[in-house]
Amino acid sequence: MKPSVLAAFAFLATLYIINPVEAANPDHIRRLLETNGCPGCNLSYANLRGTNLSYADLRRSNLSYADLSYANLSYADLRGADLRKANLFGANLRGTRR
C-alpha cells in the first residue's frame, strides 16, 4: 500500500473514532418505558424491539435508527417524530398519528 493511501486511511479512521454516533439518552428511554410517553426525546439508535408502545406519546421524538421491529405502536402519537432509517419491520402501526 502506498504511503499516501495509508496516511489517508489513517486520517479517515481517526475522524470516525473521534466523531461518536449520537445515541439514545438512557433517561429518555427510562421515561418512555415508565410513563408510555416521551415527547421531544432523543431515542435515536434505541433498542425498542418488541416493546408495547400502544398509545405512547412520541411527538417530535428522534427515533432515527431505532429498532422498533415487532413493537406495538398502535394508536401512538408520532406527529413530527423523526423515523429516518428506523427499523419498523413487523411493527403494529394501526391507528398511529403521523
Image: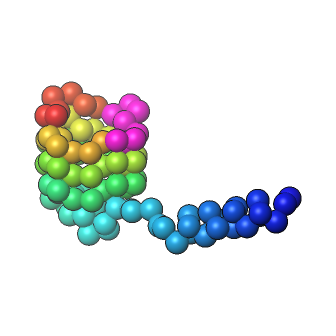
Q: Is residue 88 left or right of residue 12?
A: left
Question: Which residue is pictured at 76% across the width and 59% down the height?
Answer: 5
> From where the camera sits, is residue 50 visible?
no
Overall secondary structure of the magenta stretch?
loop
Nearest to the observer: residue 39 or residue 16: 16
> From where the camera sits, is residue 17 visible?
yes
Q: Is residue 97 left or right of residue 69?
A: left
**Magenta stretch, residue numbers:** 84-91
Q: Quick check: is 78 in the magenta stretch?
A: no
Residue 10 in which image quadrant: bottom right
Residue 80 placed where, x, y %? 16, 43
Residue 94 placed where, x, y %? 21, 27
Q: What colouring method underlies this structural image?
A: rainbow
Question: Which residue is pictured at 61% across the width and 70% down the height?
Answer: 14
Query: Which quarter shows the C terminus?
Result: top left
Residue 9 placed where, x, y %? 70, 61
Residue 2 in which image quadrant: bottom right
* Residue 45 against residue 74 in the figure, above or below: below
Nearest to the observer: residue 2 or residue 93: 2
Query: Which quarter shows the N terminus?
Result: bottom right
